[in-house]
Amino acid sequence: MDYPPKTLVVEYLLSNIPSYETSRLKGSDNIEIEFIQNYENTTSTGLLKLWKSDIEPEKIETLFSDFYKIVEDFILVLRFEGLRNADYEQIGNDNYYGMKNNYKIRNLLRSHDIKTIIAFENFDGSGITGSLFENIKFDFKAKGIKSLPLFPKEMPSIPDSMKHLVKEAINTDELNEKYVAERLRGWFFILESFKKEEITDYNEISYVRNFVTHPICKNKKTVEFIQEKFSKAIYKKDGKDVAEFHKQDPSHTTFVKKYEEMAKKRVKELIRDKIEKDDGNMKITGRK
């Protein structure tokens, strides 16, 4: 493809991704985006290409950040929706591209773990091109995706104010399923960022979180709740009812798992709703 003068082009090689239809769209601020499925005839890969024309040298660094945010948000949303282990790693050489007056792009590129191709015209009109081959790798299986969905009509976008909660949710969700108490505590930590009145079943979730957090739980409301829902965990200590969680007991973990899943559902609903209200976008397919 021929690009106009002063065009910055960045290509991201995606691996082990859902099968999308090859698509092209225009992002915010006139950034062009193209997705090519099964890149170089390799199954479950894709090439995500972003470019923008008429870019002056002093805007390059900002544009790199804009490009990187687009791909980072896409990765985070895929992982948030359960496509685990999406990740990227830098592989390749250490090339750089000199511009007139010793303007170099090298340091900018090295801060991004991407496969990059630069198509940038030298400002005396003579033209200059180059390429840096690095790799961004996604290591996950798209479970449950059977049909070929459309690539998103609009790239996923996470407001900066919500990104830390998305990452916390990903970290919690990617904990091994056997660590049910740790997962519940992780979800509850995120829930505390929202108002209690926004959270359905907040009290129930908080009681079970107390149950798995304290070696011996004495809180009256928590003990009463556990007595009603899981009396096996109740016993007398100093003449009073207390609750104690035994993580090695399958019946205990089964009971906690119910509320861990409930907390996970609430967290994901709240995060999606908040991001949409803040003009973000969590959709990973163009098909309803």
Image (tube, grey):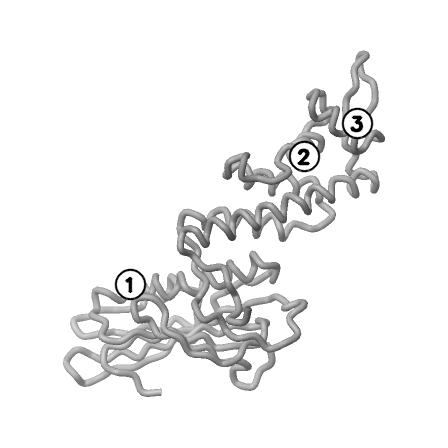
x, y percentage for residue 146? 66, 74
Q: CA distance from mark 2 to mark 1?
A: 48 Å
Would you say 37 lies left or right of 155 here?
right
Residue type at mark 1: give it.
Glu
x, y percentage for residue 38? 55, 81
Name the residue beneath numbered marker 1: 61
Would you say 196 lies left or right of 179 here?
left
Mark 2 or mark 1, which is nearer to you?
Answer: 2
Q: Residues within 10 Å of mark 1 (few under 14, many from 20)?
A: few
Picture quarter containing residue 83?
bottom right
Mark carried by residue 233: none
Helix, strand or loop at mark 1: helix
Mark 1 or mark 3, which is nearer to you?
Answer: 3
Q: Are marks 1 and 3 in contact (CB under 8 Å)?
A: no
The image quadrant where one finds the C terminus is bottom right
Nearer to the camera, 176 or 277:
277
Name the residue beneath numbered marker 3: 227
Name the residue beneath numbered marker 2: 204
Nearer to the camera, 266 or 49:
266
Residue type at mark 3: give it.
Gln
Would you say 25 lies left or right of 58 here?
right
The residue that appears at 16% across and 71% down in the rendered structure is: 101
The residue that appears at 67% across and 67% down in the rendered structure is: 143
Q: Height in image: 162 above or below 47? A: above
